[in-house]
């Protein structure tokens, strides 16, 4: 059996976040990205989303590199080869080095198309069993500590299962201590987005008193060696985000003792197939995982929800409700969070419909590739 594909459409969208999001590497509010759509002759449509940002400050990929790599390399590979399963896509893309977010955007559309052709949910196609998932929220750097405390309070009241706080030098130990004092029982973690070096070990060791669930990516975006040194010097579990691009990276980081937790982002690791492989490996090696976010619109959010139904995702992820990010999301219904949980849709594929009117309204460019 093959996965019949008639055409792939890639649409560039411009959307604006309700509020600016600030991390140690900068502030963003305008979000440009691609929605990919794979279509068959039967009228099934599979959707994917690229998660690269406009600037290469999270990783080397950008919206423009996504366009170049999808159009000039990845789509031609898909046109030349028959697929029998979505897992084939990552194997076919292997000769293209990195560009994982571009790969993931196309692979995601094929996973969704495949699940719709089989008339099963994407969660089921991936082997996920959960019918609801626990979610947390990621809070950017705020103008003042009081603003942060108010924001944390707001999301704690809404029921989010854990609060992630972005930190950077000058906005870290004292700020987290203030949050811990006001919220003694709330699960709290910190994300540094690679803002520190080994010179900061004594400073970071102060975090050990704050009962944090973890500290995410404290050291360089491409490091797993120094993280092992830091993990040996700290009680707080280290979680790797930017450093992990593949199962191979995961294997090496675990072997070195660089982390106790991994944040799996589908785009960063090249798609759902590799994300699932990393999940399976971590489960075997007693490493906890959770699903990270990239300020996605509805399609990417739906993919994150489906992945999180796998049993190893034991920690709440960053997939908050649509209304936290957007005035109007491109899916219907929007993703809703109730008491810190998202109900997993059971309809075929991603389980949410695309709101074509909203999609069209945000589309600034589109290209169709006939197979
Ligand atoms: O709400 C989300 O989608 C997660 C937000 C978030 O924490 C991140 C989004 C984008 C880039 C990073 O700063 C980051 C992360 O590092 O996990
Ligand atoms: Mg992170």
Image (cartoon, rainbow, N blue to C red):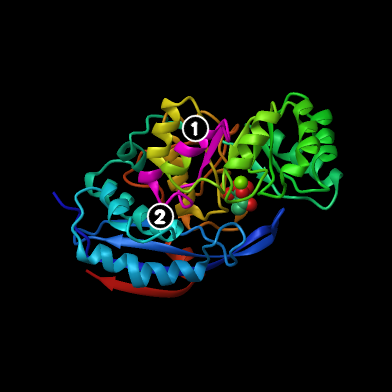
Find numbered disc 2 in the image and state the secondary structure of the residue it sits on.
helix
- x, y percent for residue 365: 45, 75
Please determine whether, in this image, residue 241 is positioned above or below residue 143: above
In the rendered structure, find residue 88 and report the number of the disc placed on it.
Answer: none
Write the start and end of the magenta stretch as one range. Answer: 251-274
For residue 360, side relative to residue 234 (left or right): left
- Residue 21 colored in magenta in the image: no
Q: Residues within 10 Å of mark 2 (few under 14, many from 20)?
A: many
In the rendered structure, find residue 104 and report the number of the disc placed on it.
Answer: 2
Q: Earlier in the sequence, mark 1 or mark 2?
A: 2
Q: Nearer the viewer, residue 73 or 364?
A: 73
- Evaluate whether residue 148 shows in this view: yes
- Residue 273 colored in magenta in the image: yes
Classify the position of the C terminus by image quarter: bottom left
Which quadrant holds residue 138?
Answer: top right
Q: Nearer the viewer, residue 59 or 226?
A: 226
- x, y percent for residue 210: 77, 28
- x, y percent for residue 263: 54, 40
- Cα distance between the residues tagged 1 and 2: 26 Å
Please determine whether, in this image, residue 30 is positioned above or below residue 326: below
- x, y percent for residue 157: 71, 34
Find numbered disc 1 in the image and state the secondary structure of the residue it sits on.
helix
Q: Which residue is mark 1?
A: 255
Of discs 1 and 2, which sits in the foreground? 1
Residue at horizontal 62%, vertical 61%? 57
């Amino acid at each position: 059996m093959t996965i019949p594909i008639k055409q792939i459409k890639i649409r560039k969208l411009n959307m604006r976040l309700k509020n600016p999001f600030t991390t140690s590497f900068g502030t963003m509010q305008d979000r440009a990205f691609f929605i990919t759509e794979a279509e068959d002759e039967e009228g099934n449509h599979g959707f994917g989303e690229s998660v690269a940002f406009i600037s290469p400050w999270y990783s080397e990929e950008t919206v423009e590199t996504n366009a170049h790599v999808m159009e000039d390399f990845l789509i031609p590979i898909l046109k030349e080869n028959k697929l029998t399963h979505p897992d084939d896509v990552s194997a076919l893309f292997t000769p293209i080095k990195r560009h994982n977010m571009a790969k993931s955007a196309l692979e995601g559309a094929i996973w969704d198309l495949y699940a719709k052709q089989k008339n099963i949910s994407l969660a089921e196609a991936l082997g996920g069993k959960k019918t609801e998932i626990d979610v947390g929220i990621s809070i950017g750097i705020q103008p003042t500590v009081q603003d942060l405390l108010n924001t944390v309070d707001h999301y704690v009241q809404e029921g989010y299962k854990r609060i992630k706080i972005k930190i950077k030098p000058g906005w870290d130990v004292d700020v987290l201590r203030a949050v811990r004092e006001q919220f003694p029982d709330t699960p709290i973690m910190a994300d540094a987005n690679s803002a520190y070096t080994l010179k900061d070990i004594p400073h970071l060791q102060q975090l050990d008193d704050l009962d944090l669930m973890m500290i995410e990516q404290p050291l360089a975006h491409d490091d797993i060696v120094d993280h092992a040194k830091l993990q040996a010097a700290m009680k707080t579990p280290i979680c790797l985000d930017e450093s992990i691009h593949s199962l191979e990276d995961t294997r090496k980081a675990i072997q070195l003792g660089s982390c106790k937790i991994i944040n799996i982002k589908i785009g960063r690791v090249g798609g759902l197939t590799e994300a699932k492989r990393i999940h399976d490996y971590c489960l075997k090696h007693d490493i906890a995982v959770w699903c990270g976010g990239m300020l996605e619109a509805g399609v990417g959010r739906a993919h994150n929800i489906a992945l999180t139904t796998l049993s190893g995702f034991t920690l709440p992820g960053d997939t908050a409700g649509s209304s936290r990010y957007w005035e109007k999301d491109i899916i219907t219904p929007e993703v809703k969070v109730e008491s810190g949980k998202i109900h997993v849709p059971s309809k075929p594929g991603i389980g949410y419909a695309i709101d074509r009117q909203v999609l069209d309204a945000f589309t600034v460019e589109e290209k169709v590739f006939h197979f």
